Amino acid sequence: MSQPPAMTVDVRRALVRQLIEQDPTLSARKIADQIGVGKDTVLRDLKAIRQAQEQPPPDPAATEPQHAPDAPAPEAAPAPRDPFDEPLRRWLTPEARADLALLMEAGHSPGYAVRRGLEVLAVAYRGAWERGLCPRGTAPEITHVNVSPCNPRESRP
């Protein structure tokens, strides 16, 4: 199986922020181990998170461009919304947090658990579409999952 793609900086920082909110005593090394990055990366993320928290929110009036009085205002076309731009805590419901905590009990980092969960779900969707069980673009109903017996020493990533 190929290596999963690296998470974006925004997703990683959201994970770091979430872990610190859950346990403010966590060391950078423990956070790094949980999300699968280096300690120095976590230290840089923590610094960026602190700097972002210290900055005052932007003044909306100051960011709007000034138009010539006789020129028509430009049409504002909504930009496509990228779900990766949202902080993880916005879409991670309490139920999803509990599921993530369960996966972390098996020794998975939050990043690995999320990537693996998405991979498993995508494989199920792709298989249903390729076998013609439902039209591409529609969500198939997943009725069961097969699990093989595991050796506890081999179950951790």
Image (spheres, rainbow, N blue to C red):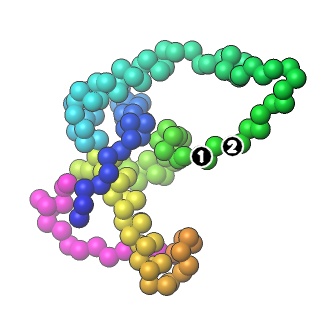
Q: Is residue 1 above or below residue 56?
A: below
Picture quarter with the C terminus: bottom left
- Residue at 42% from the left image edge and 66% from the top image edge: 122
> Foreground mark, 1 or 2?
2
Q: Residue 69 or 154: which is nearer the viewer? A: 69
Q: Is residue 4 visible?
A: yes
Q: Which residue is mark 1?
A: 81
Q: Position of residue 81 (x, y in %)?
A: 59, 46
Name the chief secondary structure element in magenta. loop
- Residue at 14% from the left image edge and 66% from the top image edge: 151
Q: Is residue 84 above or below residue 71?
A: below
Q: Residue 46 or 108: which is nearer the viewer? A: 46
Q: Is residue 147 magenta?
A: yes
Label 2, residues with CA under 10 Å away: few <14, some 14-19, many ≥20: few
Q: Which residue is mark 2?
A: 78
Q: Secondary structure at mark 1?
A: loop
Q: Residue 83 or 142: which is nearer the viewer? A: 83
Query: What range of the chain is rendered magenta?
Result: 141-157
Q: Left of 73 or right of it: where is 98?
A: left
Q: Is residue 66 magenta?
A: no
Q: Secondary structure at mark 2?
A: loop
Q: Position of residue 94 (x, y in %)?
A: 50, 47
- Residue at 51% from the left image edge and 40% from the top image edge: 85
Q: Is residue 22 visible?
A: no
Q: Position of residue 43 (x, y in %)?
A: 28, 24
Q: Is residue 83 above or below residue 52?
A: below
Label 1, residues with CA under 10 Å away: few <14, some 14-19, many ≥20: few
* Amino acid found under the numbered disc labelled 1: Arg
In the rendered structure, are the residues bearing label 1 and label 2 in contact, judged by CB atoms less than 8 Å apart? yes
Q: Left of 79 or right of it: where is 95?
A: left
Q: Residue 59 or 109: which is nearer the viewer? A: 59
Q: Left of 25 or right of it: where is 63?
A: right
